[in-house]
Amino acid sequence: MDRLIIVDKEDKEIGWGEKDECHLIPTKLHRAFSIFIFNSKGEMLIHKRSGSKKTWPDYWTNACCSHPRKGESLEEATARRLLEELGFTCLLERLFSFYYKADYDSTYGEHEIDHVFAGKYDGDVKPDRNEVEEFAFVPIDALLEDVQRSPQKYTPWFKQALPTVLEHIATKR
């Protein structure tokens, strides 16, 4: 079981907790990251979470999201998890961080300071099927339209981070 970094609202480490323990309601505020990947066509890589996930199974979300482990930097964790979950690595740029809390059901939820990273990748995706049920590179306009039309299909952190990610990407063009 992974030991996650428990933080205060300023993202300062105040302890550690087992992954399941951090996600049981009442949830513990912990450090997390979300990775957004774009290809050279400007499409975004999204994936459908495995049906075996305890929180938000079968929901669509950004390319990769997870937690740094005790003693692991965000940069080490993002590189590790991108390779484990999607079978590739690429250069990642740290964009911003945000706070959110969302209950999945009466047992599990999220309570995180989420650090958002973005990268560009055009190669093969080799997903871990224990984590990823489906994946696709999607045109941004089509994605935004689908999120607007069917928000219940997407994870709460993805919907919260998406507008700011797109603002960051637009300013770099």
Image: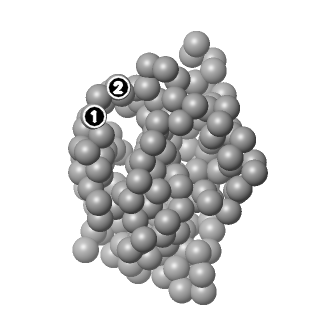
Q: Residue at x 68, y 46 (%)?
A: 146
Q: Quadrant of the N terminus?
A: bottom left
Horizontal side, residue 157 vs residue 91: left or right: right
The residue under label 2 is which amino acid type? Asp
Assign a secondary structure to mark 1. Answer: loop
| Residue 42, x across and y down, in percent | 52, 23
Whether residue 43 can be seen here: yes
Question: Across the whole image, how many numbered discs are drawn on residues?
Answer: 2
| Residue 41, x across and y down, in percent | 49, 20
Marker disc for residue 23: none
The residue under label 1 is which amino acid type? Asp
Q: Residue at x 44, y 76 (%)?
A: 54
Horizontal side, residue 77 vs residue 144: left or right: left
Marker disc for residue 124: 1
Q: Residue at x 59, y 75 (%)?
A: 104
Whether residue 8 can be seen here: no
Q: Residue at x 62, y 65 (%)?
A: 101
Q: How is the image coloured?
A: one colour
| Residue 167, x across and y down, in percent | 66, 28
**Is residue 158 positioned above or below 2 on the image?**
above
Q: Which residue is mark 2?
A: 122
Between residues 116 and 40, which one lies in front from this camera angle? 40
Between residues 167 and 58, which one lies in front from this camera angle? 58
Between residues 124 and 63, which one lies in front from this camera angle? 124
Q: Quadrant of the C terminus?
A: top right
**Is residue 124 positioned above or below 25 on the image?**
above
Q: Residues within 10 Å of mark 1 (few under 14, many from 20)?
A: few
Assign a secondary structure to mark 2. Answer: loop
Distance from the alpha carbon under mark 2 to that under mark 1: 7 Å
Residue furthest out toward the right: 149
